[in-house]
Image (cartoon, rainbow, N blue to C red):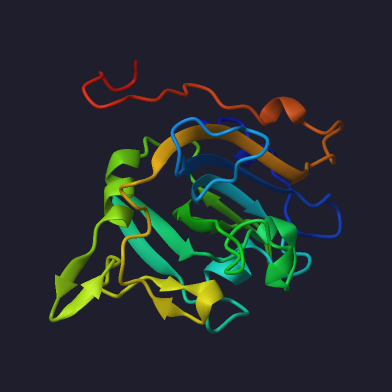
Amino acid sequence: MSVPGVASQTSINNSTNTYSNWNALLDIYFHDIANPSNSTYKAKFDLQIYQMVMDWQSSGPNWANWIVGVAWGNRPYTKKTIGGVTYLVAVNMQDPGTYEYNTSNAWVGNPSGNLDMVSMFVLPTIPTGSSSYLWGSPSVTHDVGSIIKWLSTTETRNGVTGIFDDAGVLLKDYQRSGRNITTPLISPSLYLTGLNAGFEVVNANKSTGGANQSLFTTTNYWVALPGETLGN
């Protein structure tokens, strides 16, 4: 997926520009039945792959605080490299887009609900102002199959079983008191039921005149199934 033209038009966090807050992502959904209703049947697992993120950081919690751990010492970031792309990874971090401290208000990653979530953010992070960050890359090929395999499989290292990051450290479930992930996050009984690509825009930069909606587009977007030629 490519998301061209956005980075150069993104406002920074200062007194002269309107804040921008948006992300370009793939939401990949899993259900426990093959043909779920799109209105009544809840997903069992959500794999979020954030290709680019603009974090305005005017109030928290926000993307950088929740993922990198700027303000939350119990949320250190985890790195995982798959298919040549390095991601920051969080398990059940809530959805920072809700801007809610109370987990009962989060639509994903809520331990009282039935939906688990893994969020993966493409590196690098690029400061664009004193406290604003632009993350990711405008064009990325994500090895979704290998990501799913990683989250579906445990391994044992030095007598410890679980899902490990690049540093050989177990993933942790943030919404369940930092519990180590020792079992597969994606069950083999689940069906991959949806792959949604696009933008979530909270605030768009208006300082250049207009809301710049035309910038928030995806191009060169394609999905290859096993056995298909990449890029077709």
In this orientation, which residue lies closer to the viewer: 21 or 224?
A: 224
In this orientation, which residue lies closer to the viewer: 80 or 179?
A: 179
Total marks placed: 0
Instruction: Give residue 224's position: percent from left, percent from top.
Output: 33, 24
The quadrant in which residue 105 appears is: bottom right
| Residue under the image location 47 percent in, 34 percent down | 193
Instruction: Give residue 175's position: percent from left, percent from top.
Output: 55, 73
| Residue under the image location 47 percent in, 21 percent down | 220
Instruction: Say if 118 sits above or below 29 in the image.
Output: below
Of all residues, the one furthest to the top in this rendering is: 232
In this orientation, which residue lies closer to the viewer: 103 or 190?
A: 190
Of all residues, the one furthest to the left in this rendering is: 158
Is 223 placed left or right of 215 in the picture?
left
Is 135 placed left or right of 32 in the picture?
right
In this orientation, which residue lies closer to the viewer: 154 or 217?
A: 154
The quarter in which the C terminus is drawn is top left
For residue 139, say whether it is visible. no
For residue 70, say whether it is visible. yes
The quadrant in which residue 161 appears is: bottom left
Instruction: Give residue 132's position: percent from left, percent from top.
Output: 67, 61
Is 175 placed left or right of 16 in the picture?
left
| Residue under the image location 75 percent in, 59 percent down | 13
Instruction: Say if 59 sits above or below 186 in the image.
Output: below
The quadrant in which residue 226 appears is: top left
Instruction: Give residue 213's position: percent from left, percent from top.
Output: 76, 29
| Residue under the image location 72 percent in, 64 percent down | 57
